[in-house]
Amino acid sequence: MSGIEIRKITANIGAQVFGVDLTEPLDEKTATALRDALNAHKALVFSDVNLDDEGQQAFARHFGELTTAHPTVPAVDGAPNVLPVDSEGGRAANHWHTDVTFVLNPPQASTLRSLTIPPYGGETLIADSAAAYRDLPEPLRRLADDLWAEHTNDYDYAVPEETLDEEQAARRAQFTSITYRTAHPVVRVHPLTGERGLFVGGFAQRIVGLSTGESRKLLDLFQSYVTRPENVLRHRWSENQLVLFDNRITQHYAVDNYDGLPRRLHRVTVAGDVPVGVEGKESWSVEGDASHYTAVAA
């Protein structure tokens, strides 16, 4: 397809895409151009996409086999690959994270499509974890290269359990209805670009071989590089937009700053590979089988 245009949004992360009709199947040249753009910019923004759930799934399939909506959270009715991201469903994404890192092979890419947008607030922040790794002083890079972290969906919630109402407690119980624990490299090597990125975020709870207290200090230190403003795209949603981001080398955060007004996105994710660390070692599962959720991408 001729006429595709890619415009950078920030120096480190994000680009707008023009000249692609997502309602039509992508030809090989266009699909390759979008994959190259995703590798370069980590997050791509498409406006006026005119997609429904079927169209969003068809677009995401250009990048690989789809996962189901989530290992434990229900899908949109009649659409088992589509996860509703709804303000009425709580603020579960209101922390920095990479999608579903508590399973052995987290999604390689995520798509978010806007349905209902509040008149203000509700942005999605997306951070470049490769830029974060490059920002580390050399001694910290050497340290991070050798570390592994255990990720779990039974994570350290910012909101204490005793403060939850009945509905919030039920949602939390559903999210943790199957416990997952997986050990991943703190520095993940991207399988397509060879870039190294800090693979941490909210589901990373403990450094393998260290105490909880020691782990928290190191994880907070590495996380502070991921969330530097220079490494973050702050996307202000409009209706009828789609954002595609590389889940292997980014983190994201849904900002809860819209006074409880209606906000609804739909998420479709692409099955990923098993993460690999600097020395070529793969992640391993500690607890929980996610084969019902995702196949392992080649």
Image (tube, rainbow, N blue to C red):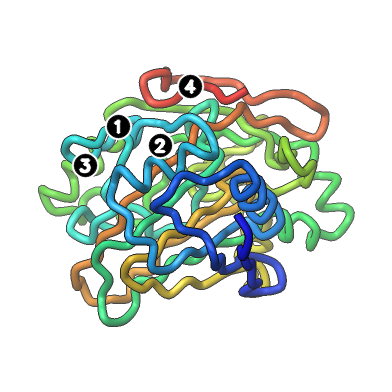
Q: Residue at x 44, y 41 (%)?
A: 269
Of the two numbered discs 3 and 1 in the rendering, the one whose residue sits closer to the viewer: 3
Q: Residue at x 60, y 28 (%)?
A: 273
Q: Earlier in the sequence, mark 3 or mark 4?
A: 3
Of residue 243 and residue 48, the one placed in the foreground of this image is 48
- Is residue 4 visible in the rendered structure shown here? yes
Of residue 151 and residue 33, the one placed in the foreground of this image is 33
Horizontal and vertical percent position of residue 237:
38, 71
Q: Earlier in the sequence, mark 4 or mark 1?
A: 1
| Residue topped by disc 3 | 76
Horizontal and vertical percent position of residue 196:
76, 46
The residue type indicated by label 1 comes to Thr
| Residue topped by disc 2 | 153
Q: Residue at x 54, y 22 (%)?
A: 296
| Residue topped by disc 4 | 295
Are the residues flagged by discs 3 and 4 in contact, CB closer than 8 Å?
A: no
The residue type indicated by label 4 comes to Ala
Horizontal and vertical percent position of residue 230:
67, 73
Are the residues flagged by discs 4 and 2 in contact, CB closer than 8 Å?
A: no
> Is 174 situated above or below 90?
above
Q: Which mark is residue 72?
A: 1
Of the two numbered discs 3 and 2 in the rendering, the one whose residue sits closer to the viewer: 3
State the SS at label 2: loop
The residue type indicated by label 2 comes to Asn
Horizontal and vertical percent position of residue 248:
61, 43
Of residue 219 and residue 102, the one placed in the foreground of this image is 102
Quadrant of the image occupied by residue 134: bottom right
Q: CA distance from mark 3 to mark 1?
A: 13 Å
Q: CA distance from mark 3 to mark 4?
A: 20 Å
State the SS at label 1: loop
The residue type indicated by label 3 comes to Val
